[in-house]
Image (cartoon, rainbow, N blue to C red):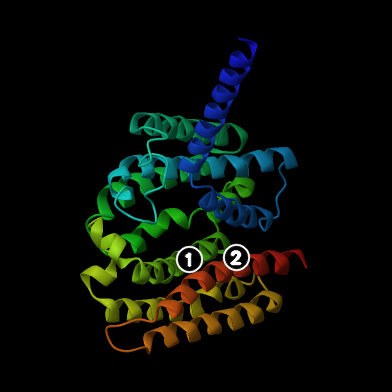
Amino acid sequence: MFLNKVKNKTITTSNFSGYTKSLISLMKPRVMSLVIFTCAVGFLTSNPTIKTFDAIISIILVAIGAGAAGCLNMWYESDLDALMTRTCLRPIPTGKVNKRQALTFGILLSIFSVGALYYYTNFLSAFLLFFTIAFYLFVYTIWLKRKTPQNIVIGGIAGSLPPVIGWSISTNSISLVSISLFLIIFFWTPSHFWALSLYKADDYKKAKIPMMPITDGIEKTKLYILIYSLLMLPVVILPYLVNFSGLTYLVPTMILTLYYNFICIDLYKHKKNKFDLKKAKKVFAYSILYLFLIFLLFLLDYLI
């Protein structure tokens, strides 16, 4: 009898642990890590004066807000997630969490993160976080994603706001510097996701999501990936043009961007209406490293 009690307790503990992991998975931890980093860069380069504890708590709250948006996204798109190999193992399609639980969790996280951020910082930061969550849910997830291949472009506004929020946490303002960081992420987003959509087109087609390779074809998708990679050239220069960053940022950033242009050109030059799988994956993988290094260089230039 004693052994049975211990066994039942172990099972209960295991179930709770698994459920907790599922809830965390709903928040898209990988996206949260990028949010923490870009938000922290925006904050640290704003010449912060607030207490270290408040700063750490505030950045974590922004990440929780991003997690809330991800959770609400999974709640609404669970029917699509079940159809795609990339997302079919998410908590809702696998039955680890039901839709009502995901919705409740997402709403509670949203209220908590926005309210707590207002308490610890200022109205502007809390409003920007609220706008980010609302835009990602209502504009991108509910309105645009199932209707237009430009969903990534317009929806990218939400993903581009964390450094602006980080800046506003410290300064209670929006500046040309924070806007330049916003624009870097905004113009980076399309080429990043369209590269992914090239080799995941079958998934998107199955889920009836109008990504560009499906609605406009492979050739136009490759062209737009190239165009947006070229647009990064003037965009990454902005922090230097507003006299905030120096050559420590500018020179390596230009080299990184030119290489990004090169691999996008290489992807585009492949056979008409076809793409090379390795090259598409290379563009996608490098784009992640590229964005990370740009923000890291921006921070290092400020600290040096």
Q: Marks 2 and 1: which is nearer the front?
A: 2
Residue at 67%, 58% (x, y): give it.
45
Residue, far right:
304
Of residues 212 and 278, the one drawn nearer to the viewer in this rendering: 278
What is the quadrant of the N terminus in the image? top right
Earlier sequence position, callout 2 versus callout 1: 1
Crowdedness near tag 1: few (<14), some (14–19) or many (≥20) residues, C-alpha within 10 Å:
many
Q: CA distance from mark 2 to mark 1?
A: 15 Å
Image-based side of 105 in relation to 55, left or right? left
Image-based side of 52 in relation to 276, left or right? right
Tell me which amino acid carries mark 1: Leu
Q: Position of residue 81 (x, y in %)?
A: 33, 49
Tell me which amino acid carries mark 2: Phe
Image-based side of 205 in relation to 135, left or right? left
Residue, far top:
1
Image-based side of 242 in relation to 140, left or right? right
Determine whether 97 is above or below 158 in the image.
Answer: above
Where does label 1 land, which residue? 183
Counting labels gives: 2
What is the quadrant of the C terminus in the image? bottom right
Of residues 304 and 12, the one drawn nearer to the viewer in this rendering: 12
Q: Secondary structure at mark 1?
A: helix
Where does label 2 land, which residue? 292
Contact flag, marks 2 and 1 (Cβ < 8 Å): no
Q: Position of residue 139 (x, y in %)?
A: 31, 50
Dividing the picture into quadrants, the one containing residue 105 is: top left
Determine whether 1 is above or below 49 in the image.
Answer: above
Q: Secondary structure at mark 2?
A: helix
Q: Position of residue 202 (x, y in %)?
A: 28, 65
